[in-house]
């Protein structure tokens, strides 16, 4: 049998093997060295990986984790699905803070009061270097949110300012943006949108000759907790406190600043939206005080979401992230609870409590193919999903 298979042209053999499941590929790879070579090829495992959780393939089929063999990603995906991981506390600090974090390649950025610190992640998988290699300053009060572009960090602070920090030098620019805390910022294509406790959202141009030029001021009638710019840079969404009878999710035109649409119809008073982001130009995810994760498809309806997942312990959801395909991760308001969701299922897939017995919200979380990072009030945590079954048993 093996001899007949190996007589096939390589492209035909790889096509045939791509229709096997993982167990069959594993058994076939034990037949001989040549077949083992073929059963480890990325092309053979790609079809399986596209159906797995957090395997590096987004819904359109694009591979966003090409540096890791696909077979290894399928193995690690089973760990995500089955909850096999090692938990580490990477950093602790003494004061209660509301840290925000971002992961950009092999660098982890997170806020410490008025600072943004950059730590190098260890290439051997051993966490991160404890000493930051860069610290970005510019705010007189705590940094609330920040985003990273190719050349800058754009941050909003409790001092009402927006700061632009050059990633490659110590240079930074600050300008007054709002009368109260800048709770959220987003940036695409030289356009920044900021949202504030002062019940406004503002649009800014950050071109080299017009840094900090205000294009629009939008009266939202509610405190703005979250903003996200559409990837097509044609519109943006605001998530507000929902203290009045208007929808907390509204879409605005970037060119004119005019209201385009309100999402949903049945939000309860106080059901503020704390985190929102676009997976694609037409798919939007949101979460907040009403304990639901919601998925909106802007091609079908603005009134009803196309999917929703309820936090089982009735906790507010502070933050969410998606792999762009099947997996969603959420951070809850009590006991540092991180949950993993398979959007093909109604119930939570896995749950981790990171701050028991004391209680802290998960203020921010990020994950890549192998690790999940969560920022709590006094500590930074990591879940490592690259472990083997024997390592999990030993924990």
Image: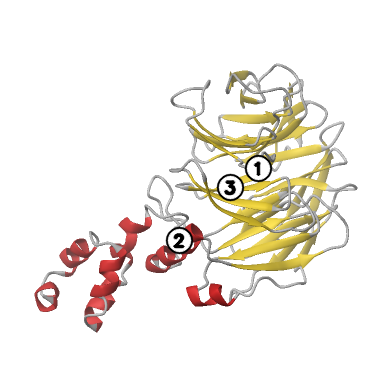
Residue for point 68% across, 23% down:
268
Q: Secondary structure at mark 1?
A: loop
The 10 Å Cα crowd at callout 3, few under 14, some 14 to 19, many 20 or more, is: many
Q: In the visual, does 195 lie left or right of 263? A: right
Q: Earlier in the sequence, mark 1 or mark 3?
A: 1
- Image location of residue 52, percent across then percent down: 40, 55
134 lies above or below 350: below
Look at discs 2 and 3 and give the one toward the viewer. Answer: 2
What's the mark number on residue 77?
Answer: 2
Tag 3 or tag 2, which sits nearer the N-term? 2
The label number, if any, that marks residue 313 in the structure image: 1
For this rendering, which residue is in front, 74 or 210? 74
> Would you call the spot at circle 2 few (<14 residues within 10 Å), some (14-19), or many (20 or more)?
many
163 left or right of 124 in image: right
The disc label shown at residue 7, or none: none
First in sequence: mark 1 vs mark 2: 2
- Who's the residue at 84% across and 63% down the image? 93
Write down the residue under mark 3. Answer: 321
Q: Quadrant of the image for the C terminus?
A: bottom right
Secondary structure beneath label 2:
helix
Q: CA gap, disc 1 to disc 3? A: 19 Å
Can residue 211 be seen from the camera position used here?
no
Count how many numbered circles sit on residues in the image. 3
The reply to whether discs 1 and 2 touch (Cβ–Cβ < 8 Å) is: no
Give the Cα separation between the discs numbered 2 and 3: 16 Å
């Amino acid at each position: 049998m093996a001899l007949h298979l190996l007589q096939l042209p390589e492209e035909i053999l790889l096509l045939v093997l791509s229709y096997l499941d993982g167990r069959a590929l594993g058994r076939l790879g034990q037949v001989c060295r040549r077949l083992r070579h073929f059963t480890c090829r990325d092309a053979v495992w790609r079809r399986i990986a596209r159906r797995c959780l957090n395997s590096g393939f987004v819904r359109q089929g694009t591979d966003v984790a090409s540096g890791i063999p696909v077979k290894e990603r399928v193995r690690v995906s089973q760990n995500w699905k089955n909850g096999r991981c090692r938990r580490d506390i990477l950093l602790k600090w003494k004061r209660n803070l509301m840290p925000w974090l971002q992961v950009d390649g092999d660098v982890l950025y997170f806020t410490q009061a008025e600072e943004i610190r950059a730590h190098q992640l260890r290439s051997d998988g051993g966490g991160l270097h404890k000493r930051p290699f860069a610290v970005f300053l510019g705010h007189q009060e705590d940094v609330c949110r920040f985003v990273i572009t190719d050349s800058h960090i754009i941050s909003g602070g409790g001092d009402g300012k927006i700061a632009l920090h050059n990633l490659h030098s110590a240079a930074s620019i600050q300008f007054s943006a709002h009368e109260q805390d800048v709770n959220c910022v987003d940036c695409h294509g030289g356009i920044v949108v900021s949202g504030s406790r002062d019940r406004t959202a503002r649009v800014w141009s950050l071109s080299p000759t017009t840094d900090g030029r205000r294009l629009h001021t939008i009266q939202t009638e509610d405190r703005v907790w979250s903003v996200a710019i559409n990837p097509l840079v044609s519109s943006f969404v605001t998530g507000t406190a929902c203290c009045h009878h208007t929808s907390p999710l509204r879409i605005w035109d970037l060119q004119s600043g005019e209201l385009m649409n309100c999402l949903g119809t049945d939000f309860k008073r106080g059901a503020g939206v704390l985190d929102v982001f676009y997976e694609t130009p037409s798919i939007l995810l949101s979460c907040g005080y009403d304990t639901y994760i919601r998925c909106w498809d802007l091609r079908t309806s603005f009134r009803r979401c196309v999917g929703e997942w309820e936090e089982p312990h009735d906790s507010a959801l502070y933050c969410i992230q998606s792999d762009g395909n099947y997996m969603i991760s959420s951070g809850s308001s009590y006991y540092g609870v991180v949950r993993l969701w398979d959007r093909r299922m109604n119930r939570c897939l896995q749950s981790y409590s990171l701050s028991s017995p004391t209680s802290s919200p998960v203020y921010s979380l990020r994950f890549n193919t192998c690790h999940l990072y969560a920022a709590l009030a006094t500590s930074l945590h990591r879940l490592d999903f690259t472990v083997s079954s024997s390592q999990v048993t030993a924990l």
